[in-house]
Amino acid sequence: MPVRLVLADDHPIVLDGLEQLFRAHKDFTVVARCQDGAETLRAVRQHRPDVLLLDIRMPAPDGLQVIRELQGESLPTRIVLLTAALEEDDVLEAVRLGVKGVVLKEMAPQMLVECVRKVAAGEQWIERRSLTRALDRVLRQEAGLREVSSVLTPREIEIVRLAAQGLRNQAIADQLHISEGTVKVHLHNIYEKLGVDGRVALTLYAREKGLI
């Protein structure tokens, strides 16, 4: 039986190209094409396709939110993300959500066809450059966190992250449900332990260790 596809991209020209590409292969059937997240959710729930080919930058809701909503619905559909550019965070989130394929739009059309075939057959296809960058970042973050954890307490690490994101003392206190004075004490201890002399140096340290 042909692989049943739902195509989702907010650009009609891209949708036309995708539909022509897959209709040229007898082992695919396009059952729906969608231009926004809400339409995509309806189509997948109605048609229960084998594969959803999904642009990550969909409007209302975006591709990752579509995946989150479908995740708990026990559908047979496997998902392939198609995107012009994919940030490391997006790759990691997609993999965590169970996405089986990630393909960049710059790749040759036949590569996309092969990716969808493999995903429909139960395999995984994730564009190597994106995955490698994402995994490298995770490894750096984990190594940095191990190093920081040997010096700072979990509460101090929380405060480092919040301070490095630009929150002032009172905002940190409000978020952690502690007093502003306690935040100041923690920051003083953090500066001493890390050998830094202020928020700018602390922010640079947090970035270097992958905490933000």
Image: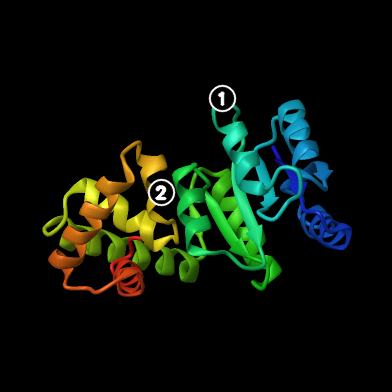
Q: Residue at x 12, y 59 (%)?
A: 151
- Whether residue 197 sits left or right of residue 102 in the image: it is left
User: Total number of numbered labels?
Assistant: 2
Displayed quadrant of residue 67: top right
Q: Secondary structure at mark 1?
A: loop
**What's the distance in space between the residues labelled 2 and 1, CA to CA?**
44 Å
Rendered location of residue 79, percent (x, y): 60, 45
Q: Is residue 75 above or below residue 150?
A: above
- Mark sitting on residue 28: none
Displayed quadrant of residue 142: bottom left
- Whether residue 132 sits left or right of residue 46 in the image: it is left
Earlier along the polypeptide chain: callout 2 or callout 1? 1
Q: Is residue 171 above or below residue 66?
A: below
- Whether residue 96 sits left or right of residue 195 in the image: it is right
Q: Secondary structure at mark 2?
A: helix
Q: Residue at x 21, y 53 (%)?
A: 185
Q: Residues within 10 Å of mark 1 (few under 14, many from 20)?
A: few
Displayed quadrant of residue 92: bottom left
Q: Looking at the image, which is closer to me, 141 or 205?
A: 205
Q: Residues within 10 Å of mark 2 (few under 14, many from 20)?
A: some
- In the picture of the structure, the residue carrying the numbered disc 1 is 74
Rendered location of residue 68, percent (x, y): 57, 37
- Mark sitting on residue 170: 2
